């Protein structure tokens, strides 16, 4: 049995990892939009949410005991519970068996902070097209659609809308429609679904929060490699990862509540903590005052993806390379696979000279 200290430490590690992937996903969308245009970002977001819907929606309904509910209610409750588990501010308001509201209230989790100002409306709409509008098809119910009444990226009071089961089959363009004149009812906590506390204790929720954020980037990697090809995807994801690592290193260090010496040994310990937050074990070897090696057992980030290209590692390494710059700009981080243990990753952390 784990001690209270160990439980609290695990939650710190999971929270740190969750914050990194939260920022990584938002940063990726902003990077693509600002450098390659809103159309490219819209395509990326649509494909990510389509893939997540295909893989998660029906199993999630069953897991959350929602699969026997009326379809509009089931879909809305799924989005309420799954996002609530992930730490998203979300509301659920039922009206009838055929109509149920869902509202993502500010501050928006997915476009956190000032990022909200950089997200074009069509990018937010792509998320709805990729997921909410397709739930009826997943349920073999061609009469179920989604009506969006507000979008936060338009300066409105939240992203809100309702699932509605019509009396006729919907054409593809009818599965998502907008009705800006409508207003969601007020949220009543007593009418919202709840998770069984015996099945969802504090530790499980903390881990689920990490997995929620992580899952966005797992899916994003698959979609990016498919849309852009391995060379371009590796370059873009590595670059974005470096930016996020640099910007969020100190925030993550604060979440971890640890002090790391300003050298290769100190950053190696940071890497151990961060990688442990994914569920992977590490073995450290100190070669000299300025060189450390780390062997990472497995790569939990890619767990469940089936065969994945080894360039995933080169892309993912950007997070740690960026964090290293923020820790000490003299550090150099490199990685390769262990030739004898193909799933293990060998990291080298060393201090490089800076010449004037």
Image (cartoon, rainbow, N blue to C red):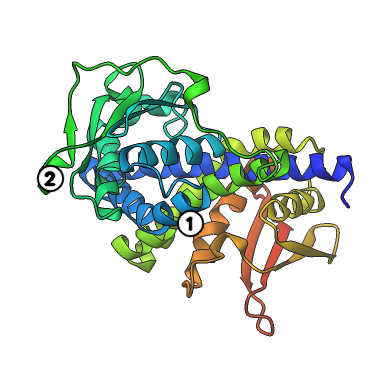
Q: Is 8 drawn above or below residue 115 in the view shown?
A: below
> Which residue is at the far bottom?
340
Marks 1 and 2, Cα distance to the nearest angstrom?
A: 32 Å
Residue at (88, 52) in percent of width and height = 1
Between 84 and 301, the residue placed more toward the observer is 84
Q: Is residue 44 visible?
A: yes
Q: Is 234 drawn above or below residue 185 in the view shown?
A: below
From the top left corner, tell me how far across and down residue 320 is, in percent. Answer: 62, 52
Left or right of 244 in this view: 288:
right
From the top left corner, tell me how far across and down residue 130 is, in percent. Answer: 28, 47
Tell me the SS state at disc 1: helix
Tell me the SS state at disc 2: loop
Do residues under tags 1 and 2 come within 8 Å of each other at their CB atoms?
no
Q: Dot 2: few (<14), some (14–19), or many (≥20) neighbours within 10 Å?
A: some
**Which numbered disc flags the more N-terminal residue, 1 or 2?**
2
Residue denoted by label 1: 218
Residue at (44, 18) in percent of width and height = 187
Between 49 and 294, the residue placed more toward the observer is 49
Q: Is residue 238 visible?
A: no
Question: Quadrant of residue 257 in the image?
Answer: top right
Between 60 and 352, the residue placed more toward the observer is 60
Left or right of 349 in this view: 164:
left
From the top left corner, tell me how far across and down residue 37 is, in percent. Answer: 24, 42
Q: Dot 1: few (<14), some (14–19), or many (≥20) neighbours within 10 Å?
A: many
Number of marks in the rendered image: 2
Residue denoted by label 2: 170
From the top left corner, tell me how far across and down residue 207 is, in percent. Answer: 65, 46
Between 150 and 286, the residue placed more toward the observer is 150
Question: Quadrant of residue 161 in the image?
Answer: top left
Residue at (42, 39) in percent of width and height = 79
């Amino acid at each position: 049995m784990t001690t209270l200290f160990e439980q609290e430490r695990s939650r710190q590690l999971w929270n740190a990892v969750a914050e990194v992937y939260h920022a990584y996903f938002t940063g990726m969308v902003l990077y693509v939009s600002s450098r390659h245009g809103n159309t490219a970002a819209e395509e990326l977001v649509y494909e990510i949410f389509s893939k997540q819907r295909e893989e998660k929606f029906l199993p999630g309904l069953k897991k959350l005991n929602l699969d026997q509910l009326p379809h509009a209610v089931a879909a809305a409750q799924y989005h309420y519970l799954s996002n609530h588990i992930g730490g998203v501010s979300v509301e659920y308001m039922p009206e009838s068996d055929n109509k149920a509201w869902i509202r993502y209230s500010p501050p928006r989790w997915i476009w956190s902070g000032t990022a909200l100002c950089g997200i074009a409306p069509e990018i937010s709409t792509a998320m709805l097209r990729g997921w909410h509008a397709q739930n009826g098809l997943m349920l073999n119910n061609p009469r179920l659609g989604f009506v969006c009444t507000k979008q936060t990226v338009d300066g409105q009071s939240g992203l809100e809308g309702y699932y509605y089961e019509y009396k006729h089959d919907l054409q593809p363009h009818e599965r998502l429609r907008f009705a800006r004149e409508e207003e969601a009812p007020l949220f009543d906590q007593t009418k919202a679904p709840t998770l069984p506390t015996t099945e969802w204790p504090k530790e499980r929720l903390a881990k689920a929060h990490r997995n929620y954020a992580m899952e966005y980037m797992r899916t994003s990697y698959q979609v990016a490699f498919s849309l852009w090809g391995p060379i371009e995807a590796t370059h873009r994801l590595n670059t974005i990862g470096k930016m996020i690592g640099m910007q969020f290193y100190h925030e993550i260090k604060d979440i971890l509540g640890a002090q790391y010496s300003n050298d290769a040994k100190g950053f190696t310990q940071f890497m151990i903590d961060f990688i442990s937050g994914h569920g992977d074990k590490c073995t450290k070897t100190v070669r000299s005052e300025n060189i450390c090696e780390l062997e990472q057992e497995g790569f939990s980030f890619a767990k469940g993806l089936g065969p994945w290209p080894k360039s995933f590692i080169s892309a993912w390494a950007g997070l740690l390379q960026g964090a290293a710059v923020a820790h000490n700009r003299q550090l150099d981080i490199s990685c390769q696979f262990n030739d004898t243990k193909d799933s293990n990753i060998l990291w080298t952390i060393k201090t490089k000279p800076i010449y004037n």
